[in-house]
Image (tube, rainbow, N blue to C red):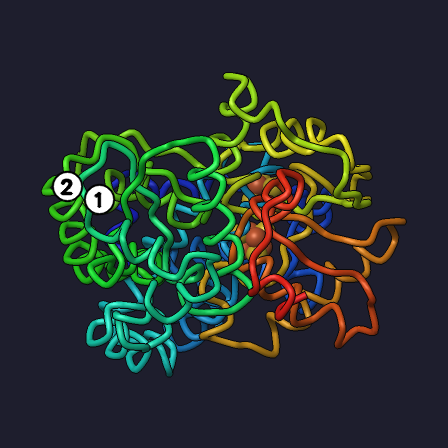
Amino acid sequence: MEFPSLKERGLDIHAFTCAQCSFCQVGHGACPTYKVKRVDSYSGKGKMLITRALAQKRISKEEGLEGLRDGIFGCTLCGGCEEVCQVDIPFIQIYQLMRSDFKDMGMWPEGLGDAKAMLMKSRNIQGQPQMDRIEGWSYWHPEEDYLLDREGVKSKTAIFLGCASSFKAVPIQASIATAMIMEKIDEEFTMLGEEEWCCGAPLIMTGDFEGAKEFALHNIRKYKELGVERIVTNCPGCYKMWAHEYHEFLDIDHEFEIIYGADFFMRLIDEGKMNNISSDYEATVTFHDGCDAGRNAGFYEEPRKVLENLPGVTFEELPHNKANCYCCGSGGVLRAFDNEFALQINELKVEDIEQTNTDIVVSMCPSCVDFMHGQLPVAGSEKASMDLAVIIAKSLGLEWEGLDEVY
Ligand code: SF4
Ligand code: SF4
C-alpha cells in the first residue's frame, strides 16, 4: 500500500468502497475542481479509483502516483464530494492523510516547502512580523490603544483572530468589528496579539501534522496562562482546527470551549444582548457558506438567523446555497499550490453571486471574504464582499476609519 497512514486508520478500504456512481462529479454543486478541469483525478471518484488501481498493482507507481498527487493537492478540501457520496467516504480526512503520505514519499508539491519554512520562521502565513498582528492596524479602532490594551490580559473569553484576519485590510475590518461588538455588549475578552501563532491549519491541510503540533501547543499554553476558558473565532478554518483537527490529527485534547463567530453572535441575539440593533443601516445581501463553516461544520442556520435579526437587512439566497454552496476557490491551501486554478474556481462563484439582486455577498470566513473582495471587481461586478461581523457592527451603528478606506 502506497498510503500507510490510510491503512493505519483503517481508511484504505475506501479505495474499494467507491461505487463509481459519479455523484461526486456531477451531483448538485459537488466538485469545483472537477467542474474546472473535467479530469477524473480531480474528483473524489477519480482519486479513489487511482488509489485502488495502485493498491491492486494494476498500474505502476510511475503511471499513477504523480497524477494522483496533483489531484490530491489540487483540491480545495471543500467537502462537496463527502457531502454527496452515497457510501459515506470521509474524503477530507483521507485527502489530508494522503497529503501526509505524499510528503513522506518526498512528493510534496513544489513551493510548499518554502511556504512551510516561512511559516515556521514568522509564525504566520503572511511571513510578516508578529508584532503587526494587532499593532499594525489598531489605529483603525476609534481608540487606538483599546485593542492593544486587550493583548495578553487575563480573561475567560478569548478572540482567536487567526492569520487570515490579522494582516490584510479587508478581513481586519471583521476583527475590529468583533472587538467593537464585544465592547458594546460589555463582554470582557483577551487577544494574544504577537503571541498568537498560526493555528496550524496550512500544515494540517497539507499533511504536516508534526509541524502543526508546535503551533497548537504554543497557543494552548498561552491561553492557559491567561485563564481562558472559551475561544471565539470568526475563521471557520481556525474553528475546525481548534474544535476537531487538533484531536483528530495531533492527538491533543484541550478543555477550551470553541465557538464559531456566527454561532457566538446568534447566541448573543438569543440572550437578548443585541436588542439595540437599528434599521438605519440598510443593505440587500446574499450569503456565501464558506466550506469549513457550512459543509465541513454545519453552521448553516446561525448566520441566517443573525441576518434575519438585522431589521435593515434584506436577504436573498444564492442559487447554490448551504450544502450546495459553491466553494470560492481559496480552501485547502490550493492558492499556494496553483493560484490560477483557484481563480478559475472563483469565477464560478462570482457567476453565482451575480445572479442575485443584492449589493453585498456576506460570509464569515476571512479567506473567502478577502478572495471575493479581490475578484468581484476583476469580473466586472459592482457587488461588495463583507464579513457578517462587519454587517452586525454597522447595524449596531458602530463606525471606524478602516471601513471607509476598504469599502
Ligand atoms: S473536497 Fe471539494 S474540491 Fe476536493 S475533490 Fe472533493 S468536491 Fe472536489
Ligand atoms: S459519490 Fe462516492 S461512491 Fe459515488 S463515485 Fe463519488 S466517491 Fe464513488
Q: Residue at x 47, y 53 (%)?
A: 176
Instruction: Please state the horizontal and vertical placement of residue 231, each as a whole percent of the image.
Output: 31, 37
Along the polypeptide, which appears first: circle 1 or circle 2? 1
Kindly identify the residue that appears in the image at 59 percent across and 52 percent down.
399
Residue type highlighted by circle 2: Leu
As drawn, the residue found furthest toward the top would be 271
> Which residue of the protein is positioned furthest toward the front in this rendering?
143
Identified at 26% across, 70% down, the residue is: 130
Kind of element beneath mark 2:
loop
Residue of label 2: 226
Q: Is residue 19 visible?
A: no
How far apart are the two marked residues, 1 and 2, measured between alpha carbons? 37 Å
Q: Is residue 73 visible?
A: yes
Q: Name the residue rendered at 60%, 66% in the picture.
A: 371
Mark 1 or mark 2, which is nearer to you?
Answer: 2
Disc 2 under 8 Å from ligand 1? The reply is: no
Q: Are marks 1 and 2 in contact (CB under 8 Å)?
A: no
Q: Quadrant of the C terminus?
A: bottom right
Q: Is residue 41 left or right of residue 130?
A: right
In the picture shown, does residue 45 fall above or below 314? Answer: below
Left or right: residue 222 versus residue 30 is left
Front-most of residues 402 and 203 = 402
How far from the left and from the top, in percent, is residue 137?
Answer: 42, 67
Report the number of numbered marks.
Answer: 2
Residue 168 higher or lower than 285, as above or below: below
Element at label 1: helix
Q: Which mark is residue 348?
A: none
Camera-nearest residue between 263 and 85: 263
Residue beneath disc 1? 8
Q: Quarter-wise, where is residue 194 in the image?
A: bottom left
Crowding near the residue tagged with mark 1, few <14, some 14–19, many ≥20 C-alpha atoms within 10 Å: few
Residue 227 percent coordinates (x, y)? 15, 35
